């Protein structure tokens, strides 16, 4: 990975790139323009983009809820042209770091049971399955619920 990679906070100018990623990465359960606009203007989540060669090629959205130390990786997308290069790992790790900075102890997510690449990525990053959600997605596939402790109280950062 010698090419320049940048993970940064998403801004309103990224909206079209975010919508394009939704279109090429997902057949269903896509985030809408309105949803992205809300997350771009809000302060109750983390919306980061991954740039490669000055192009937005990925994003991750983490939801934060007041009164809890739990973060939820709500959506993550990588352009097919950059998959398999370790960018997904870098993006998830950056999102975990942001969630830790926000005071979160745990990161949770849902992943389709047929998304073997995603399951492998999350497992390799230390996420464990703690439940299943039948018929979770619009296409009626089931989801695995996964969680990782990202910060350990009294021991600093992991």
Image (cartoon, rainbow, N blue to C red):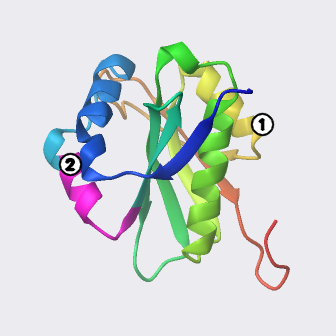
Image x and y of residue 122, in percent: 67, 38
Check if residue 37 falls in the magenta segment. Answer: yes
User: Is residue 112 located in the magenta-colored stretch of the structure?
Assistant: no
Residue 136 seen in the figure: yes
Question: Residue lying farthest left?
Answer: 34
- Does residue 45 appear to the left or right of 107 in the view shown? left
Q: Can you say whether 71 is above or below 121 in the image?
A: below
Residue with the mark numbered 1: 124
- Crowding at mark 2 (Cα within 10 Å: few <14, some 14-19, many 20+): few
Residue furthest toward the top?
A: 81
Q: 56 or 117, which is in the foreground? A: 56
Give residue 152's quadrant in the image: bottom right
As displayed, is residue 79 above or below residue 127? above
Position in image of residue 85 (x %, y %)? 68, 22
Main SS, magenta residues: helix
Q: Which residue is mark 2?
A: 35
Span of residues in magenta: 35-45
Could you tell me how far apart the alpha carbons at marks 2 and 1 are, in whole angstroms? 30 Å
Q: Position of residue 150 (x, y in %)?
A: 70, 63
On screen, 48 above or below 31?
below
């Amino acid at each position: 990975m010698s090419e320049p990679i940048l993970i940064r906070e998403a801004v309103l100018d990224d909206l079209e790139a975010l919508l394009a990623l939704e279109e090429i990465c997902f057949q269903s359960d896509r985030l809408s323009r309105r949803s992205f606009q809300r997350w771009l203007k809000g302060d109750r989540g983390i919306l980061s983009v991954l740039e490669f060669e000055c192009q937005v090629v990925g994003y991750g959205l983490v939801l934060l809820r007041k009164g809890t130390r739990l973060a939820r990786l709500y959506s993550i997308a990588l352009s097919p042209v950059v998959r398999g290069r370790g960018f997904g790992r870098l993006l998830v790790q950056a999102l975990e770091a942001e969630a830790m900075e926000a005071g979160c102890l745990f990161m949770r997510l849902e992943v389709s049971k047929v998304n073997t690449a995603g399951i492998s990525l999350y497992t390799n990053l230390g996420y464990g399955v703690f439940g299943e959600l039948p018929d979770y997605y619009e296409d009626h596939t089931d989801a695995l619920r996964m969680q990782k402790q990202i910060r350990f109280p009294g021991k600093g950062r992991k």
